[in-house]
Image (cartoon, helix red, strand yellow):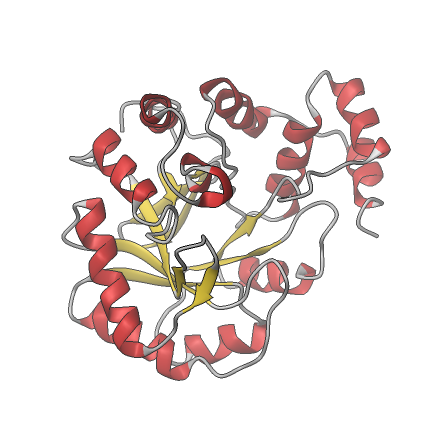
Amino acid sequence: MTSNNVPGGALPLAEGLTLNRMGYGAMQLAGPGVFGPPADRDQAVAVLREAVELGVNHIDTADFYGPTVVNEIIREALHPYPEGLHIVTKVGARRGPDGSWIHSLAPDDLKAQVRENLQHLGADVLDVVNLRLGSHLGTTDDSIAEQFGTLAELRKEGLIRHLGLSGASAAQLAEAQAIAPVVTVQNLYNLANREDDALVDRCAAENIAFAPFFPLGGFTPLQSETLSAVADRLGASPQQVALAWLLRRSATIVLIPGTSSVAHLRENVAAAGLVLPADAVAELDTIGA
């Protein structure tokens, strides 16, 4: 890494895997609807390089962002990858020609997706691969033994170092853990969406990184008079306060807010240093109650 900063603090998860808790989600580096190329590829490259300069060592991506576009931009911007930089990717989906999102969990295709991630990232091994199961619409308790077992086989072959889950239920986490260690869970969670409170606590107890996707609300950004009032009082943006609340919520929450703007990236990373007073936390806690 080119910076000694550790935004949000460091979270050791496994041998050779320590994530700085303020990471970066690369999804927005693709075109509209996470489909096609960005309007400004040079700006996308600049955002990634600035993230590393700011001390981010955890970049979340997927080969179905674009598709392939985001991984190729990551490779252009950062390869050869700095020591200690961890790229976390996902498998379990494809994109239709119209940009639609298609579940793709057949074992043979999961293997193909892993190899495509390796190719487009220019990597010999993937640091962390999350099995994408649910979406922002919710989770299920469907068995994932065959799919997760496929990734566990690739881990034994040396193509993957660590495994995680995205859009998973508590039952699916337990099923996966019976097959291989799980280091990350990536689910919908933010100030206004707290259905996974119990899973957040479980991950903390088991030293599993919980990465909230849509930490700022997602397709519909967080809007709350309470959030705005707290932000005004603290001299911060509502987005910074929402991110700071998540870091305070659990010691194993890691953040992956996305942006295609260097200025917005700096604002997000600065949220790691925002201290929330107890009265502010109490007010914010009422938002999702």
Residue 94 coordinates in the image, percent (x, y): 38, 61
Tally the marks: 0
Q: In the rendering, at what x and y percent does residue 217 appear? A: 66, 43
Percent across and percent down for residue 25 are 45, 40
- Which residue is more in the foreground, 67 or 197? 67
In percent of the image, x 67 and y 47: which residue is there?
190
* Picture residue at 45% right of the left edge, 65% below the top: 102
Q: Quadrant of residue 246?
A: top right
Q: Residue furthest front?
A: 98
Q: Is residue 44 left or right of residue 98?
A: left
Residue at (47, 80) in percent of width and height: 175
Query: Is 76 rendered above or below residue 111?
Result: above
Tell me if 276 is positioned left or right of 203 in this view: right
Please tell me which residue is depicted at 30% across the width and 70% down the height of the picture. Answer: 110
Question: Which corner quadrant of the image does residue 13 belong to?
Answer: bottom left
Q: In the picture, which quadrant includes the N terminus? A: top left
Does 18 sit left or right of 158 as displayed? right
**Is 208 placed above or below 29 here?**
below
Residue situated in front as seen by the camera: 189 or 278: 189
* Above or below for 100 versus 213: below
The spot of residue 282 in percent (x, y) is 82, 40
Please state which of residues 201 and 80 is positioned toward the viewer in this rendering: 80
Q: Quadrant of residue 171?
A: bottom right
